[in-house]
Image (cartoon, rainbow, N blue to C red):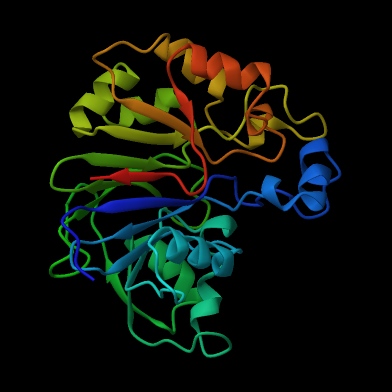
Amino acid sequence: MKSESIEVTILGIAQDGGVPQTGCSCENCIAAHSNYNLKRNSVSCGIKGKDGTFHLIEAGRNIADQLNLWSKMMNYKKIQIPDTISITHTHLGHIEGLGQFGKEVMNLKEVPFFASKSSIQALRKRELLSPFECEIIESNIAFFPSIRCGFELEFIKVPHRDEYADTHAIIIRGSNNALLFLPDHDDWRDTLEMHNCKSIREWFSKLKIDYALIDGTFWDKNELRDRDMSKIPHPTISETLEMLGERTDDDIEIYFFHLNHTNPVLNTSSKETVRVIELGWQILTEGQTFTL
């Protein structure tokens, strides 16, 4: 089915473990176990091209639910299978669903798979790529994932605990708008330095984007009481808000996602969520759509 616009559907907003997270008894996870509406999938989005093709970014553990959500949002009666898959990096929550494409489940072959060279090398060692036709993507070079899809993808390198392979954000560029998909990076200082920018606004202006989905894993550095948060580097929402301040009429729309199960902004009525909204920014929601 052809369309005149590019539609991006948000299929997950949580950090790698989702909500509820396995083995966790925190308030958010216990609530999600008893109320399906409070469950959250690990980060992912689906892109519908102008030619009706479907393109998936990230493949997490709940990919069956995510493909069902995607198909419902697009008003398809059957579950749609992605025509291509792209990943930002090889941490568990972004690749856990790749095995579902193999002979044990969907039994697909030669599905176009886009990732960096080091990501493909790391996944090949884990024998996760047999269902795919892999294409190595270079940083900062836009490409069309299929011939007539009508949009481009562009991989933007960012620093993030690259134990196994490197990490990228992905820009989705449609005919009218562009969206940045940035679920993970270590901190703003290193990311901005890597791209020779002094501020978040300067970097986003340089990228020529209209929407930014950005790493909001934790609210602040005191969130995990039983773990050393210095070993889990992410820019906290509090830090990002300090850098951004209040939104102006000249700013693009910014949404926080990749939310850890402990993050208070998962509660839409929390004071932390209210603070984000008061400053003019937003928390991403599953099923939300963007037209590019």
Nearer to us in this view, 230 or 79: 79
User: Is residue 127 something that shows in the picture?
Assistant: no
Quarter of the rendering containing residue 165: bottom left
Q: Can residue 292 be seen in the rendering of this structure?
A: yes
Instruction: Report the number of discs.
Output: 0
Nearer to the camera, 248 or 128? 248
At a point 55% along the width and 77% down the height, the residue shown is 99
Picture coordinates of residue 244, whole percent (x, y):
40, 14
Residue 114: image quadrant is bottom left
Measured along the vertical axis of the image, is residue 217 above or below residue 270?
Answer: below
Going by the picture, which residue comes out furthest to the right?
25
Which residue is at a point 72% across and 22% down the rendered structure image?
Answer: 222
Q: Nearer the viewer, residue 242 or 45?
A: 45
Q: Position of residue 167 (x, y in %)?
A: 41, 49
Which image quadrant: the N terminus? bottom left
Q: Residue at x 51, y 40 (%)?
A: 285
Residue shown at the point (23%, 45%) measured from the top left: 292
Residue 72 vs 100, above or below: the answer is above
Answer left or right for 48 relative to 238.
Answer: left
Residue 184 placement (x, y as % from top left): 48, 41
Residue 137 horizontal side relative to residue 60, left or right: left
From this view, report whether residue 149 is shown above or below residue 289: below
Q: Position of residue 11 (x, y in %)?
A: 49, 54
